[in-house]
Image (cartoon, coloured by chain):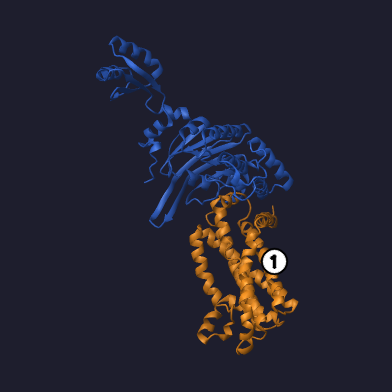
Chain colours: A blue, B orange
């Protein structure tokens, strides 16, 4: 569905050129949900805008939905849907007229446009909002309207830029269901996000991008395996025994150097759940009492930290 | 899908949204009406006792100026509407469709022209009770010229909006350009009263030629050279405006 080679985009600003995207290769198959994960400033939105013909690449080529990005942008536009980050509806317009106007710009006749619009409104839980002004809709409703606007022409390839940013947890979960149902219709979804749980929950494959370059590609599971295993966190009752507990933990097969922070001892092992019973018996034998124990599976933040040396949550601007 | 149909869709949307809040249409009209009612009557005596004026009574000299003022000020600020649409993400949403960039511009420009022509007709009709008498044919051609001005300034305003992106920047630029252009076009008082240096400067202003043309048309003088200059100036402005507008809509798009 998408084949890109060396896509790059440099912006000329007053303070000098900014290389927002420095050479991105992509290969997305039909029917996948692919996630573009990275911190703010990584180049996600810029890449997306290049793929949707809104921005001209300064280098590289791409074929999107079967059309050459540079030679046939109109062809690309016919086949794709795009839901931008900040919203796409005019406050003073009515929800119903927005979707009909949008459909008509794709060449769909008025009657057909109204029918499709109504069907999408029902599917996305926007019933009864047809005649309401967009300004009077809630945040979640407005976002679902944006998605409806991007889908009205039934595109085979849908680009979603940060689809759930700014939504409450219930709307987020709701929207995830809608994105999953897109795949059931056979569409391909390419979404950007800086939410780890979103990438983990939705995506078949994730591309991790940082400073304009792709630093990792894989399924969520594959990426997490690249990180140094599970974290076993022991909370001791007696802070004086922490050193003893650390020695025991450090002696496990495949364990790294444990970290001690007051009563908290954390060690990484390849498989926490199989190592834990043995560790607990050893601690018990030495009379070291535990207030609590936790086995933490690696998160995508751990992946990011491993790959880039920075935490996704640090949100540093690109250098 | 044809270009004409795409333009029609954009035009249809713009008209629907524009007429939902009709108060804005009357606000644009209020300025020339105020000038007409409160300033116009002062000119009657001035015109009678001043030499060097173009032929015609006060109203035949003044109302053409008001029409061109409407053509300029009525349309040059439409860019603000586009800035609002840009901020709402609507322009990007439309740019991602296969619709041509020129249609996205032209549909909006045509709406502005329709609104302007309605306002211009109302202004002309309002002048009649004050004392305006002009041949209908001349008035019709004059309205076409004013419509052309509207198309030009509307396109330029949209181009400026796309480039400047914020209301503050747009307001500064538009005011900086519109006020001198207005003063140099002989709208309130004809440039024939001006000293030579000022008259030469105003000759560069295409709006001045359009005002002169409309004055000639209101006299029924279709063959006057000023009418020809005016038509050429208006046509030139329309071409420049539409070209710049379309080019700017295409910018940043593959």
Q: Is residue A3 above or below residue A277?
A: below
Residue A271, image x and y in percent?
A: 39, 19
Residue B150, image x and y in percent?
A: 63, 67
Residue A240 left/right relative to A221: left
Residue B46, image x and y in percent?
A: 61, 85
Q: Name the residue under label 1.
A: B118
Q: In which quarter of the image is residue A309?
A: top left
Residue at the outermost top position:
A285
Residue B176 seen by the camera: yes
In terms of depth relative to the viewer, which is nearer, A161 or B98?
A161
Q: Which residue is drawn at 67% across and 57% down?
A: B19
Residue A44 left/right relative to A65: left
In terms of depth relative to the viewer, which is nearer, B72 or B66?
B66
Q: Which chain carries label 1?
A: B
Q: Quadrant of residue B126?
A: bottom right
Q: In which quarter of the image is the N terminus of chain A?
A: top right
Element type where label 1 sits in the image: helix
Residue B106 seen by the camera: no
Q: Residue at x 49, y 50 (%)?
A: A57
In terms of depth relative to the viewer, which is nearer, A33 or B145?
B145
């Amino acid at each position: 569905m998408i084949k890109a080679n060396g896509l790059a985009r440099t912006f000329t600003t007053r303070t000098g050129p900014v290389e927002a995207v420095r050479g991105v290769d992509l290969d997305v198959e039909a029917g996948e949900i692919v996630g573009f994960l990275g911190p703010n400033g990584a180049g996600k939105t810029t890449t997306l805008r290049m793929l949707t013909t809104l921005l001209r690449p300064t280098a590289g080529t791409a074929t999107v939905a079967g059309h050459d990005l540079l030679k046939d942008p109109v062809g690309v536009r016919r086949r794709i849907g795009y839901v931008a980050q900040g919203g796409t509806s005019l406050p003073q317009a009515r929800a119903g007229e927005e979707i009909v106007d949008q459909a008509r710009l794709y060449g769909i006749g008025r009657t057909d446009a109204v029918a499709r619009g109504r069907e999408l409104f029902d599917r996305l839980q926007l019933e009864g909002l047809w005649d309401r002004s967009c300004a009077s809709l809630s945040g979640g409703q407005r976002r679902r309207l944006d998605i409806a606007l991007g889908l009205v022409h039934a595109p085979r390839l849908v680009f979603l830029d940060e689809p759930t940013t700014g939504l409450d947890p219930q709307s987020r979960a709701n929207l995830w269901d809608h994105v999953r149902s897109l795949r059931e219709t056979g569409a391909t979804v390419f979404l950007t996000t800086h939410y780890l749980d979103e990438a983990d929950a939705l995506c078949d494959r994730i591309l991790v991008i940082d400073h304009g370059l792709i630093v990792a590609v894989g399924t969520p599971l594959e990426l997490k395996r690249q990180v140094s295993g599970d974290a076993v966190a022991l909370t001791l009752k007696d802070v004086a025994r922490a050193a003893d507990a650390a020695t025991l933990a450090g002696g496990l097969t495949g364990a790294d150097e444990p970290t001690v922070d007051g009563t908290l001892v954390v060690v990484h092992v390849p498989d926490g759940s199989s190592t834990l019973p043995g560790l607990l018996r050893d601690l018990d034998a030495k009379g070291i009492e535990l207030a609590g124990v936790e086995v933490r599976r690696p998160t995508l933040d751990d992946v990011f930290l491993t790959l880039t040396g920075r935490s996704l949550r640090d949100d540093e601007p690109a250098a | 899908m044809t270009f004409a149909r795409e333009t029609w869709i954009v035009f249809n949307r713009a008209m629907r949204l524009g007429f939902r809040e009709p108060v804005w249409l009357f606000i644009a009209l209020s300025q020339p009406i105020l000038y007409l009612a409160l300033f116009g009557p002062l000119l009657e005596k001035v015109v009678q006792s001043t030499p060097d004026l173009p032929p015609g009574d006060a109203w035949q000299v003044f109302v053409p100026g008001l029409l061109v003022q409407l053509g300029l000020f009525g349309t040059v600020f439409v860019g603000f509407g586009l800035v609002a649409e840009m901020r709402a993400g609507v322009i990007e949403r439309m740019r991602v469709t296969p619709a041509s960039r020129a249609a996205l511009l032209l549909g909006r420009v045509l709406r502005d022209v329709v609104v302007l022509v309605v306002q211009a007709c109302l202004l002309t009709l309002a002048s009649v009770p004050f004392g305006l008498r002009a041949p209908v044919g001349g008035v019709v051609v004059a309205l076409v010229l004013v419509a052309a001005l509207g198309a030009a300034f509307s396109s330029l305003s949209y181009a400026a909006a796309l480039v400047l992106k914020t209301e503050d920047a747009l307001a500064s630029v538009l005011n900086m350009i519109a006020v001198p252009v207005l003063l140099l076009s002989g709208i309130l008082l004809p440039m024939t009263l001006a000293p030579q240096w000022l008259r030469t400067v105003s000759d560069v202003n295409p709006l001045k030629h359009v005002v002169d043309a409309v004055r000639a048309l209101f006299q029924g003088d279709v063959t006057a050279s000023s009418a020809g200059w005016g038509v050429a100036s208006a046509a030139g402005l329309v071409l420049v405006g539409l070209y710049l507008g379309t080019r700017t809509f295409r910018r940043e798009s593959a």
